[in-house]
Image (tube, helix red, strand yellow):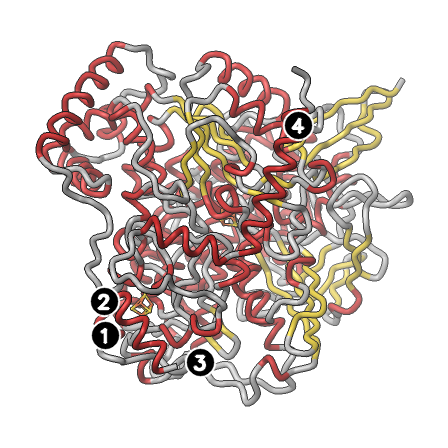
Amino acid sequence: MIKLIEKIEGEAKLNFSFQEGRIDDVQVDFMSSRGIEEILKGKSPLDALVINPRVCGICGHAHLIATVQALESCYEDIKISKKAKIIRELTLNFEIIQNHFKWFYLTIFPLFGLKQEIMKALHPSQLMGKAIALFGGQYPHTSYAIVGGVACEITNMDIIKLQRYIDETIGFFEKNVANADIQTLQKLENTADIMTKQGDLPDILRTIEKNGWQKLGKSYDRFIAFGENSCFAKGKLLNARIYRNVFVEDVRESDSTTSFAKSVHYLDRYYEVGPLARAMIKKNPLIKDAHGRYEDSMFTRILARVYEIAGLLTHSRSLIEELDLSEPSYIKPDIDISQLNSSGSSAVEAARGTLIHKVEIENSVIKNYEIITPTQWNLCGGDNKNRGVSQKAMIGLNNTDIAELVFKTFDVCSVCTTH
Amino acid sequence: MPDRIEGVKKLFTSRSARVETNKGESYYNDLFERCQTRLRELRVSQPANDRLDFSEVLSNNGVDRRDFMKWVSATTAMLMLPPMFSPLVAEAAELMNRAPVIWLELQDCAGNSEALLRSDGPKIDEIVLDIISLEFHETLQAAAGFQAEKQLEDAIKTFKGKYLLFVEGSVPMGMNGQYGTIGAGAETFYDHLMRVSKDAAAVVAVGACATFGGIPAAAPNPTQAVGVMDVVKGKPLINIPACPANPANMVGVVIHYILTGQLPELDSLLRPKFAFGYRIHDNCERRAHFDAGEYVEEWGDEGAKNNFCLYKMGCKGPMTFNNCSIIRYNEAVNWPIGVGRGCIGCSEPDFWDKYAYERPMANAKIKAPAGGVEKSVDEFGLGLLTAAGIGIGIHAIASAIGGKKEDGGAE
Ligand code: SF4
Ligand code: SF4
C-alpha cells in the first residue's frame, strides 16, 4: 500500500510516499522563483553587485563576494590587497556564524520539542550583524565590495569594536552552546569529549543518542567544497578518499519538471555541501571521529554545523591580527570592466555550502549569468536513476517528523534554492 | 559635469525641513486627547495574545526602566511627536499585545524579516518579537506546513478586521501567478495575499519588493512582479520601502497605529512621512564636503580616506528619501554612506534599474525636478515616478491584471 503525505516547509513542498511503513520516496519541490539570472542579462556588470546580494537576505554577503570574485576572474590579471581579502573573508565568516546560531536556536530547537530560543539566536547574530556593518554599512544586503577591493576605509577604532563583538560572541558560545573554553573545544578529537560537556549543543547530541537516532539521515557520504580561502579547503570526498583537484567547469545544472529548483551534480554525481563537507575535506579531527562512528547522519551534520562556529570565531580573531591598515583598500584594475569581453567564475563557501557564480561579459554588458546555490546541491530533487542528497537521507525513515528533522539538518533556504 | 553639480547644489542646499514637524499647539492637544482615549479603550480590551507581560519581559532581559525610556523618547521623536507624547508612547509599547500582526512572505529574499530580527537592540527585539503579537510569521514561527496554515486561518478569524498585515516580497503576476505558490493547495501568492488582506485593518508593505516590485521587477521583470499597492485595493495601505526596510520604521508604524488607531501621515508614494520625509543628502554626514566641493574621485583615493562626498562615485543620496542617515542600521553601528560606498537609492521606485551602482547621477537618466527650490517630498516623489516610464508601465499592467482577476472572481 502506498500512502502519500504532503508536508510544507516554508516554500518547499515535500511529498512522501510510504511503503510498508517506511518512506520509499519523497519529492522535494520549491514553489517560487524570481528569475534573477534573467534580470542580470543585458545589465552593466557592476549592477550585479547591487542585485545579487538581494538573491538572499540570509546569505547575501556570500552572494556579494561571489559576484565580485566572478567579475574579477574575468581579468587576466587583477591585484587585490591582502587587507581587502581579509576584510571580505571576515565578513563572510561573520555571516556564516550568525546563520548557524539562528539555525540552531530557531529551527533545530523546536524539532527536539524545545522552545525556540529567540534571545539566544538573536544576541550573537546581532553582534555579528554589527561586525559586518562596520565594513559593509548595513546587514543584510551590503554592497561594499567593489571590483579591485573594498570601498570601506577602516580605522583602528573599528578594529577595537570588531574585537569586542567577536569576544562577546565567543563568550556567548562558551557560556551557552558548549560549556568550555573555546581553545579547548577546538582541540577536541573524540566525540565522547563533547558529549560530557554541559551546554545546548551537547544536550541536543545527548537527546539524539538517547533516542537512538545517531545513524538516521545518512545520504551518499560524498562531500564537495570549492570555496578556498584561509579557512576552507577545496576538494571532494568520494569512496573515503579526498581528491584535491575539483573544477568548477565540471559542475552542471539540470532542470526539474516539477520544481523551480534545478539540480546540481559534479561529474554526474550528487554531493553534499556545507559545514559537514567542509570539515571532512579539511580533516577536522572531531568531525572525522563523529563521522567514523555515525557517518553522514543527522548527528554528524548537526555537530559539524554548530562546531564550525567555534572554528570561525577563533579564525576570525587571528585574521584581524593580520590586518595591515596601511595597505590600500582598493587597487584600480588596469582596464575598466566595461572594456572587457570575457568570462569568469567564482566559488565561495556560504553558510549552507559552496556557492558558485559564472559570468560572461560582452559589449559592456552581462551576456549570461549563472548562480548555483548550496541548497541546490543539498535539497534539489534527483532524477529517475538517482535521488538528490536530502531525498536519499530521508528515504527509509519511518515517519515524517524524523524526515522533517533530517531535511532541516541541511539548513533549508528556499529563496536561495530557486532565486 | 561641474554645471550639473552646481545645479544640484542649488537645488538641495535649501532648507531641509520638508516635513511639518510643528503643527501647532491645538493640533497636538487634540491628538493627545484622542490618543489617551484610544489607549484607555485598548487597555480594557483583550490582548491578542497573553504571551508575555511587558514589564516582566523587560526586567527578565535585564533592561532597566532607563533604557526603555531612552528608547521611548527616541521613538517619540522619530514619529515626529512633541516630547509630551512620551508617556503615551511608553503606554502604547506596553499595549503592543493588543495589536495582532500577521506577516506574509511572498516573492522575497527574507531580508526584511532578517532585518526585523536585528532591530534596535535586544530590548526592542523583545518588544517586537514577543510583545507585538506576531500572530503569524512564516519564517519566524516554529510551526510549519498544515499547522501553520491552520494558525493563519485562526488568526484571520479571531482578529477579523483588526489585524495589521505586513507583507514582504512582491507579487508575481506572470504565468497566472504560477511563479510563486504557497501551501498544500498551491495557492498563488496573489490569491494568498488577496485572501489574507481581505480582513486586515490595514496592509503594510515592507521592503522594496513589496512596495514597488523590487529586484524581481527589475527589467525584463521575468515573473511580472508587482508591488502590493498594485493589487490590493480598497484598504488602507502603507509602504515602508528600502532594501531591507529599517526595522525602526516597522516598529514605528505599529506604535503609531496603537497610539492613534490610524496610519501615520503618508507621502504620494504611501510612505510614512515620519520616516521618508527626509532626504538622505540633507542629513548626510558628508554633506559639508559636498558643499565644499570635496569629492571622492576614485575608490580608495585621498578623498575616500577622508570621508569626502560620494556624489561623483554615484551616490544617490540627493534623490533618495529615507531616514537611514539619522537612525542608521544594526543598532546604529553604521550605514552605507558611512563605509564610503554611497547610497543606491533603495527606498525609491525602480532603484534596481535606474540607480543601481556606480552610475553618477548625471548619467543615471534621472532628473531632479527642476525649477522650485522648495519642492515638497510629495512633489519630488511624484516627479521621480513620472520620470520612470517603465515603473508606470508595470504598475498599469499590474492593475489591469489585478482588476481582471477581481472581476472574474467567484462572487
Ligand atoms: S526589499 Fe530587499 S530585503 Fe526586502 S525582500 Fe526585497 S530584496 Fe529582500
Ligand atoms: S555622500 Fe551622497 S548623500 Fe552624502 S553629501 Fe555626498 S551626495 Fe549627498
* Residue type at numbered disc 4: Gly
Q: Which residue is mark 2?
A: B13
Element type at marker 3?
loop
Task: State the separation of the CA atoms marked 3 and 1.
Answer: 26 Å
- Pointers 4 and 3 within a single chain: no
Task: State the separation of the CA atoms marked 2 and 3.
Answer: 32 Å
Q: Which residue is mark 3?
A: A330
- Asked if the residues shown at circle 1 and circle 4 are in contact, with their CB atoms under 8 angstroms apart, the answer is no
Residue A185 seen anywhere in this rendered image of the structure: no
Q: Which residue is mark 4?
A: B183
Q: Residue at x 59, y 55 (%)?
A: B218
Camera-nearest label, 2 or 1: 2
**Residue A265, disc:** none
Task: State the separation of the CA atoms marked 4 and 2.
Answer: 52 Å
Task: State the separation of the CA atoms marked 1 and 4.
Answer: 54 Å
Q: Which residue is mark 1?
A: B291
